[in-house]
Amino acid sequence: MANLLVTGAAGFIGANFVYYWLDTYPGDRVIGLDALTYAGNHESIRSAESNPAFRFVHGDIRDQALIEKLLREEKIDTIVHFAAESHVDRSISGPDAFIDTNIGGTHSMLKAARAVWLDGPEGRLPHRFHHVSTDEVYGTLGPNDPPFTESTPYAPNSPYSASKAASDHLVRAYHHTYGLEVTTSNCSNNYGPYQFPEKLIPLVLINILHGKALPIYGDGKQIRDWLYVDDHARGIDLIIKKGRLGETYNIGGHNEWTNIDIVNLICKLMDERFAADLQMKEKYPDAPAARGEKANSLITYVKDRPGHDQRYAIDAAKTTAELAYKPVESFETGIDKTISWYLDNEGWWQRILDGSYQEWIDQQYADRKAS
């Protein structure tokens, strides 16, 4: 039996990981920690709270005393550290929160882990600190460059990716300096249930339903490698169970798409959903299909964001060779599940849109289009 502390548990990937772990290892105890900032949604893990093996704690990763208390109180032996400010646009307009949370917060987690697991009165305790990072720390690729490997030099291009790179280095340093037992994973773009509506795929889905513009940065030719969120959870599981201490492992989907192709695909799939279900036209009268139009008529090109990386691609050969990692979902099955989830869970995302988020995102894209 393992006792896990999952930080960022009410965020997109953290919530999916909580459900994955509880389903896969029903004998384990999972403590979910989240500060419930704009991207942390308590509703995302509400179902998990009916499971006696799960406990939610509303708290901040920068609170070292709280982390130490939880590690001792719950006899935590494994930390899975997702918590981070992650939206690149927000890091450009307000980088301080990213430095504070992603660097300072990770350091507080590491200090707490060291204090309890290495320097406590019981002596050294069995433990694992798994740190979840991003492919954005590697910078950008040209169209013909080979994908990122674990030995690709770091070259972050936004305050977000720079803050994540710094946190990666801190985790490495605590392993080599103090002997903390750590692993790190760098993943490609995730998609799936519970993703906050500012991200590309849910933003496009929801805006189609409401007949709102689909904003495309620049020419839309930026390339990303897409990974279904449950496949990310499976990769982390393998790293925790079988990964070598101090090592970094890439988790990718081998699934490169340009942003504009992703948007056009979702438009096509949504048009097909409307054609197959006439009730959708009544439920979403502002959608293009309800007016006899195509969803791609909503595509609107806006000014590119500063320092926009052109291409990310992950080479997961090391993770496959050492841990037998392989994504289960194809992009076709994953995107179909994702669309179905958002259509079946309108209450979840509508409550988010009813808050201040929609105002903020509309203004961001209006400013870019005007300029």
Image (cartoon, rainbow, N blue to C red):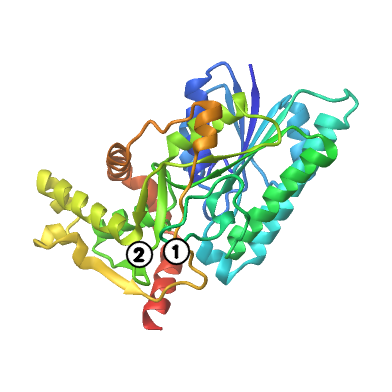
Q: Residues within 10 Å of mark 1 (few under 14, many from 20)?
A: some
Q: Amino acid at mark 2?
A: Lys
Q: Nearer the viewer, residue 25 or 166?
A: 166
Res. 322 image quadrant: top right
Read off the residue under disc 2.
221
Q: Residue at x 59, y 58 (%)?
A: 161
Q: Amino acid at mark 1?
A: Gln
Give the answer, above or below, for where 203 lies relative to 239: below
Q: Secondary structure at mark 2?
A: loop
Q: Look at the image and tell me in which quarter the N terminus lies.
A: top right
Q: Residues within 10 Å of mark 2 (few under 14, many from 20)?
A: some
Res. 114 image quadrant: top right
Give the spatial CA distance, label 1 vs label 2.
8 Å
Q: Residue at x 58, y 65 (%)?
A: 158
> Where is residue 272 drawn, in percent x and y?
15, 48
Can you see residue 63?
no
Identify the residue at the far bottom of this view. 371
Q: Residue at x 73, y 54 (%)?
A: 104
Give the answer, above or below, for where 302 lies relative to 255: below
Read off the residue under disc 1.
310
> Where is residue 142 drawn, in percent x and y?
45, 62
User: Which of the numbered marks, if any, corresponds to residue 167?
Assistant: none
Q: Look at the image and tell me in which quarter the C terminus lies.
A: bottom left
> Where is residue 251 drawn, in percent x and y?
51, 40
Q: Residue at x 76, y 23 (%)?
A: 126
Horizontal side of residue 163 vs 127, given as left or right: left
Give the answer, above or below, for where 335 lies relative to 92: above
The reply to whether dot 1 and dot 2 touch (C-beta < 8 Å) is yes
Horizontal side of residue 63 vs 331, given as left or right: right
Which of marks 2 and 1 precedes in the sequence? 2
